[in-house]
Image (tube, rainbow, N blue to C red):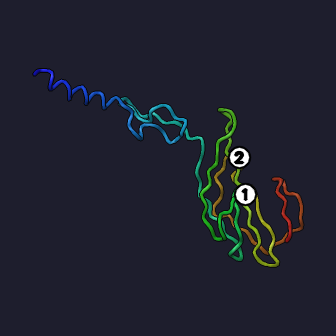
Amino acid sequence: MRTVPLIPFLLCCCACAIPQPGMYGASPYAKKPVSSFFGQQQEAAPYVDETVDVVSYPPGARIQVNDAFAGYAPVRYSVRRLWRGQPGMMTLDTVKIEALPVAAGQCVQGGFYGQGNQKVPSPVSFTMTSCAPAQQSPEGYRNSSK
């Protein structure tokens, strides 16, 4: 009869030793526990999520973020920026934002944002009627009239 109380005690101890959901970090590659009995451990995420607001004058321009359709301006879009490079020399991906015309007399507008690990400015605004002559910009992005 003395073994009966011992069985629930052993089951309770075994249940505590099994990893539970939520013990591992947000990264699918994380193998270390986020928290433990002795202290808090944190892992750096391999990405940064940012929310970008894009507006156009006049409103209604077709907005693309990193070559994916985001909606018609004004629009709010969530973008995931990945860390690239070797440890100590890591940089974040830049974000390509384009505003495509939807009416006559408008021009394609766009650019690269978040260079040098900076946050993407918000809101990003485009004036669709300011058509500059087609020329190569320093970032390597070409503005063209349509």
Label 2 amino acid? Gly
Disc 1 target residue:
67
Q: Nearer the viewer, mark 1 or mark 2?
A: 1
Query: Which residue corresponds to the image point at 89% horizontal and 64% vertical from the top-left?
Result: 134
Residue 119: image location, x then y, percent: 64, 52
Q: Is residue 146 above or below residue 45?
A: below
In the rendered image, the vertical position of residue 138 relative to residue 45, given as above or below: below
Q: Residue 45's image quarter?
A: top right
Q: Element under label 2?
A: helix
Query: How many dots with numbers?
Result: 2
Q: Where residue 116 is drawn, which disc sits there? A: 2
When asked about the image quadrant of residue 14, the answer is: top left
**Marks 1,2: beta carbons within 8 A:** no
Q: Nearer the viewer, residue 96 or 131?
A: 96
Q: CA distance from mark 1 to mark 2?
A: 21 Å
| Relative vertical location of residue 54 with respect to residue 20 in this rendering, above or below | below
Could you tell me which quadrant the N terminus lies in?
top left
For this orientation, the residue located farthest to the bottom is 104
Name the image quarter holding the C terminus: bottom right
Instruction: Give the mark nearest the N terminus, 1 or 2.
Output: 1
Q: Which residue sits at x=74%, y=66%?
A: 99
The image's mark for residue 32 is none
Per the image, label 1 sits on a secondary structure element best described as: loop
Compared to residue 74, the image places residue 41 above or below, namely above
Where residue 39 sits: x, y (%)? Answer: 39, 32
Q: Residue furthest left?
A: 1
Q: Quadrant of residue 111?
A: bottom right
Q: Amino acid at mark 1?
A: Asp
Q: Is 106 positioned to the left or the right of 78 in the image?
A: right
Image position of 137 (left or right of 46): right
How far from the left and from the top, in percent, is residue 64?
Answer: 70, 62
Query: Which residue is painted at 65% across and 58% down in the image?
Result: 121
